[in-house]
Amino acid sequence: MGRSRDMYEIAQRMLSLHTDPARDVCVTIGLPYEEPTGEWSCPYRIDGLDGWEHERKVTGVDSMQAVELVLVVVRSALAGSHEAREGLLDVDVEGPQSVYVSWDKDNDVAYIAMKREIAVGEAVRQKVVDDVVLDFAESGELLGVELLEADRLMPSEMRL
């Protein structure tokens, strides 16, 4: 899959290859977008591993499933790479970390936090994309995602 659209990056992780000299592996995940078919795709790229130099995407039934699937695919790609099999790349192969969801049904707003508590003032930058607000820390780390039309945007499994 070539780069058919510019990826709006929402998350990035740097890993190190234990080579001489050491090399970086950069994993980038983009903002999910709706395909003409109604499905949702989430783009990603892994720079620094042989054979992964171009943008790819994972497609799901909705934006949340696309994000969930891209995390699984990236984790699998890293763990299955010849660099990881040769012991040159330390990869956490455990399952995905938990996210914390709160939903204000009266106002139809949900918040998906990447950690249990976000301190007041910790989110220093926001990016608004349609009905989604991304909260970032000073370091650039994604802290949480606010869904302004949660009933429409959240998968039914999360609407508890």
Image (cartoon, grey):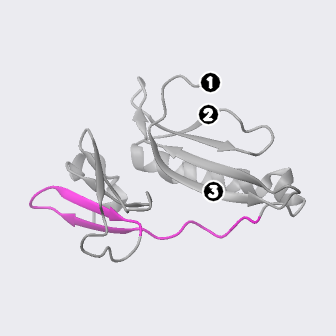
Decide: is 48 above or below 33: below
Q: Earlier in the sequence, mark 3 or mark 1?
A: 1
Q: What is the CA distance from the residue labelled 2 to the residue labelled 1?
A: 6 Å
Per the image, the residue denoted by label 2 is: 55
Kindly state the secondary structure of the residue where label 3 is placed.
strand
Q: Earlier in the sequence, mark 2 or mark 1?
A: 1
Q: Earlier in the sequence, mark 3 or mark 2?
A: 3
The reply to whether the magenta stretch includes residue 93 is: yes
The amino acid pointed to by label 1 is: Gly
x%, y% of residue 22? 81, 57
Q: Is residue 38 left or right of residue 107?
A: right
Per the image, the residue denoted by label 1 is: 2
Per the image, the residue denoted by label 3 is: 14
Mark 2 and mark 1 in contact? Answer it, CB < 8 Å. yes
The amino acid pointed to by label 3 is: Met
Q: Residue at x 65, y 70 (%)?
A: 94
x%, y% of residue 128? 26, 44
Q: Which image quarter holds the N terminus?
A: top right
Mark 3 and mark 1 in contact? Answer it, CB < 8 Å. no
Kindly state the secondary structure of the residue where label 1 is placed.
loop
The reply to whether the magenta stretch includes residue 11 is: no
x%, y% of residue 64? 41, 50
Q: Which image quarter holds the C terminus?
A: bottom left
- Which span of residues is magenta-colored? 90-114
